[in-house]
Image: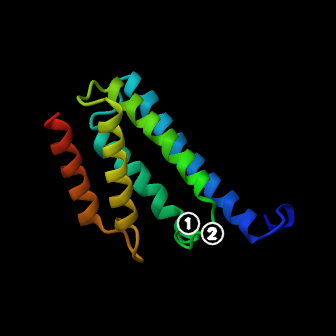
Amino acid sequence: MHQYLPDREAIAAALVARYHERIEAQMDAIIDRVEVGAVDDPVREVIGRIAQIYTEERSVRLVRAMGAVAADGGRAHKARMVDKLRELMVRCGMPGTDMAVVRIVFASADAVMHEAFAGDEPDATLLAELETMLRAYLDQR
């Protein structure tokens, strides 16, 4: 990869962009599966699929943690993810699909996911609590 990109920052940006694309593609796949009734538990499905990517892409998480990538790319990714999450929630008939609720759900899940994968091994307890927290919040809407 280095032979095609001018410097380490460009390599880091390319790795993170690919990582973001992979996560966004998983959200699209889940949304498509909801359309055909193949998703029984959207909360578990999203957390499980994103957790799998986090597990497989440890090096990219380290690059992101070092702050080697411009923040604007991260903001654009988060905005796309919020839009995808809202679409998923609407298609699942979930309550609370106004943008403030969707942004809270995304920001909370994003923060807990990052914390759950901050160590050498994923923290399964945090991931389970994230599912519980999201269900409780969405159920009260």
Q: Where, by quadrant of the figure, is residue 90 drawn?
A: top left
State the CA–CA distance, disc 1 to disc 2. Answer: 6 Å
Residue 82 vs 14, above or below: the answer is above
| Residue at 55%, 53% in the rendered image | 74
Indicate the amino acid at tag 2: Ala
Drawn side of residue 107 relative to residue 3, left or right: left
Mark 1 closeness class: few <14, some 14–19, many ≥20 residues within 10 Å: some
Q: Are marks 1 and 2 in contact (CB under 8 Å)?
A: yes
Residue 101: image location, x then y, percent: 29, 37
Q: Nearer the viewer, residue 141 or 128?
A: 141
Colour convention of the picture: rainbow
Residue 1 visible in the picture: yes
Drawn side of residue 137 relative to residue 23, left or right: left
The residue wearing badge 2 is 68
Q: Nearer the viewer, residue 56 or 61?
A: 61
Indicate the amino acid at tag 1: Arg
Q: Nearer the viewer, residue 138 or 58?
A: 138
Pick the quarter of the image with the C terminus: top left
The residue wearing badge 1 is 64
Residue 130: image location, x then y, percent: 25, 55
Mark 2 closeness class: few <14, some 14–19, many ≥20 residues within 10 Å: some
Residue 26 visible in the picture: no
| Residue at 18%, 43% in the rendered image | 137
Residue 34: image location, x then y, percent: 38, 28
Residue 73: image location, x then y, percent: 61, 52
| Residue at 32%, 29% in the rendered image | 98
Drawn side of residue 54 relative to residue 46, left or right: right
Pick the quarter of the image with the N terminus: bottom right
